[in-house]
Image (cartoon, helix red, strand yellow):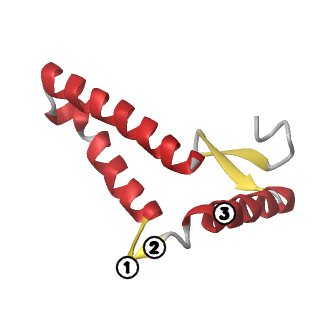
Amino acid sequence: MLGDRDLVTSTQEDGKTVYTLTPEGTEAAEEAKERFESRFGDMSEGGTSVRSSGMALLEVLRSLGRTANEDQAEKIRQLLDETRKQVLTILAE
């Protein structure tokens, strides 16, 4: 996908595939970073941004498979679905 768009190149080193950004890939990554930061980077209050809160939540969600039982996972799924809907409602205002 990225290789098809000439954003990365790949080489084999010690039996592993190593990917490297091309100049076009570096430019695309910088543009994506700027778009993300322009949307989420300035939404801060008290030192906590939407981005950092989202990243902290992702860290918790990554551990679900190791720590949550089936009932807990279902409750968390429902909470996340409802939260997503609420965020979309806020953005639609």
Instruction: Give whichever of discs 2 and 3 has the lower sequence position.
Output: 3
3D distance between C-alphas at marks 1 and 3: 20 Å
Q: Residue at x 59, y 39 (%)?
A: 15
Residue 1: give x, y in percent of width and height. Answer: 76, 34
- Which secondary structure, mark 1? loop
Above or below for 8 versus 39? above
Rendering quarter of residue 33? bottom right
Tag 1 residue: 47
Q: Does residue 55 lie above or below 73 as drawn?
A: below
Q: Amino acid at mark 3?
A: Lys
Q: Position of residue 82 (x, y in %)?
A: 35, 33
Residue 34, image x and y in percent? Answer: 70, 67
Q: Which residue is situated farthest in the top direction here?
A: 70
Instruction: Give me the disc on residue 17.
Output: none
Tag 3 residue: 33
**Left or right position of 69 against 7:** left
Asked whether 31 or 49 is in front, the reply is 49
Q: Is residue 53 above or below residue 68?
A: below
Instruction: Inspect the image, locate mark 2, and give the three-letter code of the amino acid beneath it.
Output: Ser
